[in-house]
Image (tube, rainbow, N blue to C red):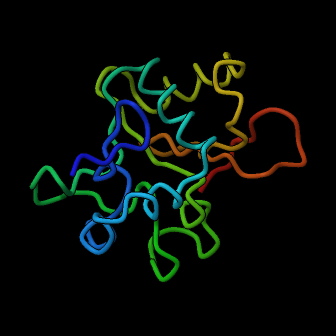
Amino acid sequence: MNLKLAPNFHIKELVPESIFDQFSANEPFLVALFDDKALITLQALREQFGSTYVNTWHLGNDIGMHFRGYRPLHCNVGARCSYHKLGMAFDCNFTKVSAEEARQYILKNPQQFPHITAMEGQVSWLHFDVRPADWDGIRVFNP
């Protein structure tokens, strides 16, 4: 089955292997895991920066990443109340630009990414989320 949530992403890129194995036959369930604003933003990032990756477990490498998109509630990776667990956050890397270059571009061009409300700074990946915010613009937080 070829499940897609955004035009240039496959579900395997966005959920851990265990979730894919358990629910791949139920496309509506998997689609419901994600906030539309997060998916729109993820697609906009790929359109702006080219090749973008989130999870890589499906590529068969030894260091395949599992929890850079959706994280199950019982997941111990990241913060206890992570927006990943609500389908509102992604961690991305790009092949053509560094995470810092992407962060700076987004901060200079927020109108291109109107749903981003927060990004993590000082890390080698681009974490963005679309959390409800009581501030204007994009807040950058550090680990």
Residue pictured at 28% horizontal, 65% vertical = 25
Q: Quadrant of residue 50?
A: top left
On screen, residue 128 above or below 12: above
Residue pushed farthest bottom? 74
On the rendered structure, is 19 left or right of 104?
A: left
Image quadrant for the C terminus? bottom right
On the rendered structure, is 16 left or right of 100?
A: left
Residue pictured at 45% horizontal, 33% vertical = 99
On screen, residue 37 above or below 88: above
Measured as percent of width and height from the top left, residue 13 is found at: 31, 49
On screen, residue 65 above or below 125: below
Measured as percent of width and height from the top left, residue 123 is found at: 48, 46
Residue pictured at 42% horizontal, 41% vertical = 92
Measured as percent of width and height from the top left, residue 134 is found at: 90, 48
On the rendered structure, is 20 left or right of 136?
A: left
Measured as percent of width and height from the top left, residue 35 is found at: 60, 51
Q: Is residue 45 or residue 27 the one in the foreground?
A: 27
Residue pictured at 33% horizontal, 70% vertical = 23
